[in-house]
Image: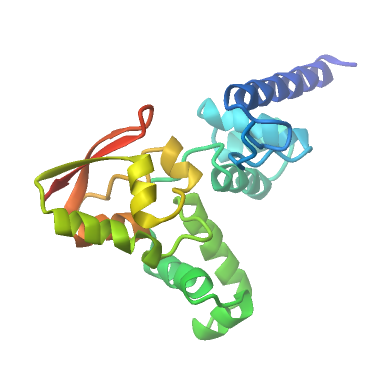
Amino acid sequence: MNIAEIALVVKEELARAEVNIMQRLLGLGSHGISVTGEMQVKSLPENPKYAMALSMYKNGGTHSGVAKALGVSVAKAKDYYSWLVKHDYLPPETGELSAIERQVVDCLYDKGMSLTEAATALNCAVANITTRRDSAMKKGFREGETMSKYTPLGKYLEKTGQIRITLTFAEIEQIIGGKLPAYLRKWEAGWYGTAGGSPTHYQKKAWCSAGYQVETLELGSEKVVFYKV
């Protein structure tokens, strides 16, 4: 083996070790399942380049840099990145959904349309639908999330009417009658709104429509403070 081949093997082994440590600290088995049996994080594909891409992106790697290191196209590196964000290995991108992204996820998830039906409704190609869907996923949108899921939270805040309201994640889940998506437990992006913009994520729309914003967030203790604006 030459130096370049040895370096590649070292990178692969280090990336695998990092993922194994992450899964162990999260209490996950090899299939991304916690000891309680609840699905937490989907396990990485067997392709070692996913683990290598994860390590490089976590250390500030760019799409072009990751592509060069892995010997793949930039488009392929972006595919790795999208998968890692979608499955909560990397934080979602900041920013609200664009108008077309909002329309796509509304069609697919709020209205339950197929890709073909959504493409027909929005007068575009199926490829455009999948591209906008994946873009929304990178910004933190998750399948199964609907406006109706978070409506009870907005109503609760509105009814309470207090200047500041502190809720634990468990209390929020009790209010909405369901689980918060994993990315809201791991990253701040899904909680804080974009300055000067109208929120497009369902959870943020719920509390903003009730006249509240997030003041402080403690991911470690799973607690959030809303304040009335």
Q: Residue at x 61, y 32 (%)?
A: 54
Chosen colour scheme: rainbow
Q: Residue at x 83, y 21 (%)?
A: 5
State the image quarter where residue 69 is shown.
top right
> In terms of depth relative to the viewer, which is nearer, 191 or 52?
191
Q: Is residue 199 above or below residue 218?
A: below
State the image quarter where residue 39 is shown.
top right
Residue 213 location (% of width, % of height): 20, 48
Side (left or right) of 68 relative to 225: right
> In terms of depth relative to the viewer, which is nearer, 221 or 66?
221
Q: Residue at x 21, y 62 (%)?
A: 209
User: Which image quadrant: the N terminus?
Assistant: top right
Residue 91 appears in the figure: yes
Side (left or right) of 192 relative to 120: left
Task: State how many labels appear.
Answer: 0
Residue 228 location (% of width, % of height): 12, 49
Side (left or right) of 187 relative to 61: left
State the image quarter where residue 148 is shown.
bottom left
Q: Residue at x 64, y 49 (%)?
A: 79
**Outermost residue toward the right in this view:** 1
Q: Is residue 229 above or below residue 10?
A: below
Residue 23 location (% of width, % of height): 64, 27
Residue 96 appears in the figure: no
> In terms of depth relative to the viewer, which is nearer, 215 or 4?
215
